[in-house]
Amino acid sequence: MKEGKSLIDAQENPLLIGWREWVSLPDICLPAIKAKIDTGARTSALHTFFLETVRQDGIDHIRFKMHPLQRKQNPVITCMAPLKDERMVSDSGGHRELRPVIESTLEIAGRRWSIELTLTNRENMLFRMLLGRTSMTGRVQIDPARSYITGKQLARSYRKPRLPKTKD
């Protein structure tokens, strides 16, 4: 399906989401992350605590590590994506920072589309990801009084498998 047609379909039938939702970023092998839906933020942001630029097949990539779960140091996920850009971004406190920008597919409630993400250390923030307004324009409708409208099934992505019970 062409991108233009999928956007028209999304505008006619926007996805209803709450002020926080579980999302997936399959292009960077991130099965689940809790995102704050933030219409005050222009660009989406993803938590990282280690960044390095690597050249692969003549293209600059950014390799980064992140903790996808709030208030937890494990698991540690290593991701890599082509470096799309570097931009000056102002955070909510007015501090300006030069951030790397990547592109990834966002998946939420079975719908997928491409978004841009800036990479920054969000260790002291409650949410490891912000979904900014440019990533949602024409695709979603937000109910700010609700959470996890699309479900919590992705939350199980990091749980350790339980061993089957055995009879003694």
Image: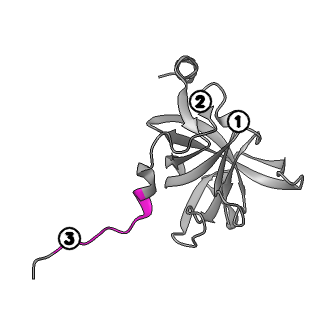
**Magenta region, main secondary structure:** loop
Q: Earlier in the sequence, mark 1 or mark 3?
A: 1
Q: Secondary structure at mark 3?
A: loop
The image shows residue 102 at horizontal and vertical percentages of: 67, 47
Q: Residue furthest front?
A: 145
Rounded to the nearest angstrom, the CA distance separating label 2 from label 3 is 40 Å
**Mark 2 / mark 3, whichever is N-terminal:** 2
Residue, disc 3: 164
Q: Which residue does the numbered mark 1 point to in the structure image?
A: 133
Badge 3, how many Cα within 10 Å: few under 14, some, many 20+?
few
* Marks 2/1: CA–CA distance: 10 Å
The residue range painted magenta reads: 156-165
* Amino acid tagged 2: Val
- Write the residue at 59% across / 27% down: 139
Look at the numbered disc 2 and give the secondary structure of its residue: strand
Foreground pick, 136 / 97: 136
Badge number at residue 140: 2
Percent x, y for residue 134? 70, 34
Is 161 inside the magenta-drawn segment?
yes
Q: Is residue 129 magenta?
A: no
Q: Amino acid at mark 1?
A: Arg
Colour logic? one colour
Query: Which circle marks residue 39 in the picture?
Result: none
